[in-house]
Amino acid sequence: MELRKLFIRGLFGHFNHTIKFKEGNVTILTAPNGYGKTVCLKVIDSIFNRKLSFLCDLQFTAIELETSEGVLTIEKDMEESPNKITLGHGDLEKSHEYHRDYTLSKKTTIHAIDTSIPFLHRIGPREWEDIRTDDIYSFDEVIETFSEYLPDEFTAQKYPEWFVVFTDSLKAHFIQDQRLIQRKGSADRNRRKSFIDTIEKYADELSDLIRQSGFRSSHVSQQLDTTFPERLLRNDKYFVPMEAENLKQELQKLQGIRSELSAFDLLSSAQHLPALHVLDEIKPEDKKVLTLYVQDTKEKLSSYDGIYKKIELFSRILNSKRLSFKRIKINSSRGFQFETERGRPLELTQLSSGEQHQVVLLYELIFKTEKNVLVLIDEPEISLHVAWQKEFLKDLKEIINIQSMPVVVATHSPQIIDGNWDLTVDLEEGGLA
């Protein structure tokens, strides 16, 4: 699905906003404070992540979202039913009313959540943590987000099928302005609110990602090693062994890949390959062995393809004069850490707030999004030096090259725009309601 245009009428009772999404992958929203840049991002997020209670609480009269899959309309009567919205799809001539007032008792519904959704852990009277992602959900958010897991008698409202199909056509990931601190649930045994530094959480996540890649590679290796003798002895008339010169070239490439992976601790060491100078006089049966070896090694190392590209980009951007007298180091045990130019380790929280914002924002863009996921970024300039702000779009476009994702940015900063005014939509020009 591609977004084409978003229209919001009567926002806060004052504004009519029309956003025509730019061709390509980047649209930048600008406006003075109070015009609703962040709200526009939240409207898109609430639609595709089905958080409709946000729209029930928002002051507006109509929303139209034009996409390659048709037009979604959302209407509200602020005088008669300010907490109710009506969903419609232009191609289907159907409508569905959604309201914030759930009719079932709190006790019954809370019990239904506890017994019906095994991956949610209750951390408060009306709060749950998703143990898979560490995300925290309120009562209303659980009902909206996980209603399909609840028995029909426990849910007061269901989404129409056409709305589910529409919203499933595009995933959205919202990077909010508050990035350095996150709510923490499962470790809080006394049900008190606790928090965790995001940079430490993301370092742990990267450590897990590296280990998972290693597990996948080990699994592939085990399968290939088990079948290697049978494949070596098989009389396959279609199998053509490589010549010595080609084997040399392929083994040199593999050695380079091993060295690169080892530099990021994805492999334990740059393992030695067969000596290249002995390949000129090998026998035909040796060529078959080495050809199978090259093919198998490529397949084993392919388990690291995705994460290597992301780690290389993450490290290269941060080490390109972004951190004052510091360098990032990647390893499997800690994910990422930082050290001074003299090689002395630093605690992650010893980085300045601007440096932490830079690390967290890059991590989210590179590791927490997927291909073709719509990314919504609120005020990327927060705590960033002007020089870093001017590099943001260049970095973003490089990330898009490997992620292939559309991005909508809300910003006050001309340094973030850095002359790319053709990518901007000025909400101040939209007019008053």
Image (cartoon, rainbow, N blue to C red):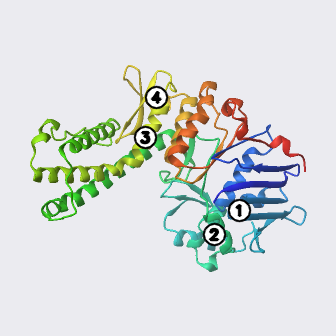
The quarter of the displayed image where residue 8 is located: bottom right
Give the Cα distance between marks 3 and 2. 34 Å
**At 59% across and 30% down in the image, what residue appears?**
391
Depth check: give the residue in front, 19 or 34.
19
Q: Residue lying furthest bottom in this view? A: 153
Q: Which of marks 3 and 2 is nearer the N terminus?
A: 2
Query: What amino acid type is highlighted by mark number 4?
Result: Asn
Q: Which of marks 2 and 1 is nearer the N terminus?
A: 1
What residue would you read off at disc 2? 165
What residue would you read off at disc 1? 52
Q: Is residue 252 among the parts visible in the rendering?
A: yes
Q: In this view, does 7 lie above or below 157?
A: above
Q: Is mark 4 on a helix, strand or loop?
A: helix
**At 58% across and 34% down in the image, what residue appears?**
394
**At 15% across and 52% down in the image, what residue appears?**
289
Q: Is mark 2 on a helix, strand or loop?
A: helix
Q: Which of marks 4 and 3 is nearer the N terminus?
A: 3
Q: Which of marks 4 and 2 is nearer the N terminus?
A: 2
